[in-house]
Amino acid sequence: MVIDFQTSPDEYRHWRMEIIGEIANLIMDVDENGGLFNGYELKLNSYDLGVDIELYDAIQRLRFEYPSVRVVVLRSGKDRVFCAGANIKMLAASSHVHKVNFCKFTNETRNAMEDASRFSGQKYIAAVQGACAGGGYELALACDHIILTDDGSSSVSLPEIPLLGVLPGTGGLTRVTDKRKVRRDRADVLCTVEEGIKGKKAVDWGLVDQLAVNSRFEQCLTETVEQFKEMSDRPEELNSCRGIRLGALHREVQVDFLQYSSVTVDIHRESKLATISVAASDRDAPLDMEGMISEGDQYWGIRVARELDDAILHLRLNEPEIGIWQFRTQGDRKLAMAHDDFLSQHQQHWLVREILLNWARVLRRIDLTSRSLIALIEPDSCFIGTLAELAFASDRIFMADGEFEDQPGVEAGLTLGEANFGHYQMANGLSRLETRFLGEPEKLNVLRPLVGEVLNAERANELGLVTFTYDDIDWEDEIRIFIEERASFSPDAMTGMEAILRFGGPETMETKIFGRLTAWQNWIFQRPNAVGEEGALKRYGSGKKAVFDPHRT
Amino acid sequence: MMTEIENMQHKASTGIDYGVSIPNNVNLAGDKRILKALERWHGGYLDWWRNMGPEGFQDAMVYLRTAVGVERDGWAKFGFIKMPEYRWGVLLAPQVPDRVIGFGDHKGQPAWQEVPGEYRGMLRRLVVIQGDTEPASVEQQRFLGKTAPSLYDMRNLFQVNVEEARHLWAMVYLLQKYFGADGREESNELLTRRSGNQDKPRMLGAFNEEMPDWLSFFMFTYFTDRDGKMQLESLAQSGFDPLSRTCRFMLTEEAHHMFVGESGISRIIERTCQAMNQARIENPYDIEAVRALGVIDLPTMQKKANLHYSLSLDLFGSEISTNAANAYSAGIKGRFHEDRIEDDHQLLNDTYPTLRLIGGQPKIVDEPALTALNMRLRNDYVRDTSGGIGRWNKVVARNAVDFEFRLPHEAFNRNIGEFSRVRTNPDGMIIGEQAFAEQKDQWLPSSEDADYVTSLMKLQTEIGKFANWIAPPKSGINKMPGEFEYVKIQ
């Protein structure tokens, strides 16, 4: 079954989105029988990837389609349950690959909520009435503020360890320690007590921000929403501003081929390789913001980022054996530069802000993908500014040196833009160039004046912007040999190595979340104590007690 | 007040120590720490009883029985007492020497006298949920005294109330004694939740329902207290010995509550049939004519039974339950009469025929026996419940009225488990939402039915007199005559 990441509010089965002026209610009401796969029921607002795909879609739409929204209230449409977290039967029945990618996507979605709050002034409030367990609490943790009903029984909990013998997989532990700064011994208690922490203790320990009894819950929520409305930095004029409606993507999906308007993916199964080609805009940059807005979701910066995002997610979830992605670009370099300049000039505008932030998220998704990434800078390529980030996100950058026989008169070029100097932060909080040159920070000062210049292979190599340069004679062979060699390595070792090498520099909450997910959680997820015949996750639901290997590593 | 010597003698003969503030047979006098903790809790408890116990009768002298021993025979002593002065206490069934755990992973090991660390959370939850139902029912029933159909019934109500409150004591003792600071916190919370309160509701749905009239009360004690019985029966099997012992003693009291329910409903049926015969009404469905006699028509009673039965089935939880399976494997909660079942008492590879919704229809399918324990307990409940229905039908038959009570299908009117997603008629046939809405009033009490029953609820305090809608009992309490002032209202 092919997992499709495209949806729209008319098609939601699990969420409702209500927009009331500056407030959006995002209501989780999971359809028990609406699981993505057979064999489990999504009881008690538990979720699978399908539920999260809708949440991700809603969050994206809130940013592009509803500029007036300052506060998003996340709540449950069900009685006495907020969210019971990821569906356990689904997890137990899933392949390791699916579990990891599911966790990765849900994490990216939680991060997108925090990103919306931090950079777009859309504040998230979790209104928790009823059980809020595991992934349910992690969803609340991704919000700016958690209100918990004080009914003597509703609690927040992370029961993964006592129940399942695994760790919370959506940043729960890291957000408890690093975001909410809960004392470590209290966090230890929280994570080992199945029924969680309720009432006053939950507030005293900093697990939630506010308590409200049921009869005053709506009133407290309204007051809190008002306070957060004031905290949002969204300009007043957005209240009357129309958003950009995100229509369905134009795409054609075949077995070895994906075609969007400006993105194509070719899958070469025998080489375990996917070629992702992105075309720069073939139109002039808009004259002004009016012009850009009139293009709606067809504006290049919006359209291509969405297409690329969809293609990445498709490859991640549906093509796990395709271990190498190579990025290519094409198009008119002048037009590409003009579009990038336009975005830089108007970055104060709310829509441009969203476009740049969305690109940043898409690029971060690429950084976080466990595939070998390479960029091919060829004579007809268009690695300029934003598109050059695809190269800087790659593990290896190959650049063609000099003219190629079949393309006389053109030479490969790489052009830096303003976009490469801070528009697109990686998870570590730095730009890709800053991360690339961690050991020689003065390099940024050398590169900055070169913005707009076409750098040929020799120059780019000299500046350290590419890995290797090859001329016409060697190009094809070198690339082929590299790909064959790469495909022969252990995929696990590649995943680990790439993840470590990509994120030099400082730790942030985001790098910690993904690093720990990849290392600790996924390690535990693989161990017999979790998934062996007598492991806790395997036995969950059977009534049979787990048998643990007592050796500590 | 007993003298020191009297008390010592009393204690020697009954095993219950009435010499300390809290009567007990667990040697509280030698356990000063827990005695102190319970004394502290006692104040809050009495406040709760005064605020939430029977409204308007706190000063009445009630002919109540108090436990004076924990053996099956001879534990009851009758006398007049004001309810707030009732000797609530901590009474456990006698310890069985060398008792071993009878089921689950720990089968054959000595029963635990202390809480095993790994099951602390699970045990505490079970004790808290059981404990929460006890005060909840007292709260639900607190206004019923004002419309009692007789002093006899009023006394039975109060007996049920003080015993439910004692069951709260029983659970609180376990929490205080074995669960440390968390247990103390939970003990206090048991006094702060309130039945039907939006802000601090009781934990289970059925215990937040209103109890507006005596028909509801009898139905509740018949159907819902019987769920309590089944839960206590399975906890009485527990490998945690103090829980087992306390539940065994609670069961002796619970039996009286179900007697109140079953006999109460029988007496209403008796009275209705008599009145119909006297008025020569043959058609039990001629509701208008029957109601004109000031008695409760049998179809309305069937509807009430349908409602209380289905609400009580919900209390068994989902048919397939991980929690039930875990509690069984852990040796904490067994099956009904576990010790009389002949199998391996571990159920690792057994299956159990379970009623499930398959392809939109109720079907019995084999499920792993461990996860189907709720289903099994519910089946035991259904069997236990059917007995009383048969006895009610005998009353109807003896009066030669053409009517038969029956239990609705288990899929009918459910809010929890497999069948909460569908609507069925009382025969278990799946019907649409609209069809259900249209016919609901034929199957479940309508607001007119409720209004009619409410209209009959008038206080009858004359000694030996009974409201028109209920027959007198065959015999009084403790061999007292019917003409006895069971409650002396001050």
Image (cartoon, coloured by chain):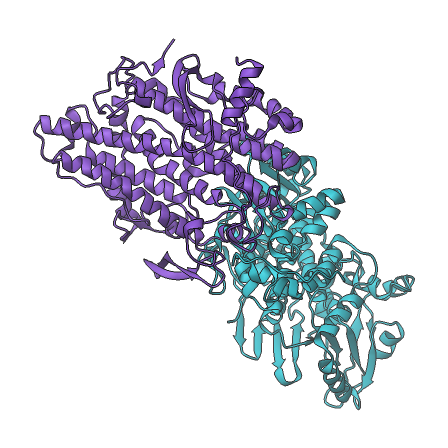
Chain colours: A cyan, B purple
- Compared with B171, A250 (above or below) is below
- Compared with B350, A120 (above or below) is above
Residue at screen point 42% across, 38% down: B228
Residue A297 appears at what percent x and percent y? 58, 60
Residue at screen point 91% across, 64% down: A440
Residue at screen point 10% across, 26% down: B278
**How many numbered dots are placed on residues in this image?**
0
Location of residue B489 by image quarter: top left
- Compared with A469, A205 (above or below) is above
Foreground residue among B68 and B389: B68
Quadrant, the C terminus of chain A = bottom right
Residue A334 appears at what percent x and percent y? 73, 70
Residue A20 appears at what percent x and percent y? 52, 41
Residue A465 appears at what percent x and percent y? 84, 71
- Compared with B413, B154 (above or below) is above
Residue at far top of view: B490
Location of residue B449 by image quarter: top left
Foreground residue among B351 and A141: B351
Location of residue B138 by image quarter: top left
Left/right placement of residue A162 relative to residue B397 reads right
Residue B197 appears anywhere in the view:
no
Foreground residue among A408 and A179: A179
Residue at far left of view: B280
Residue B405 appears anywhere in the view:
yes
Residue at screen point 46% across, 34% down: B249
Left/right placement of residue B79 relative to residue A392 reads left
Left/right placement of residue A182 relative to residue B102 reads right
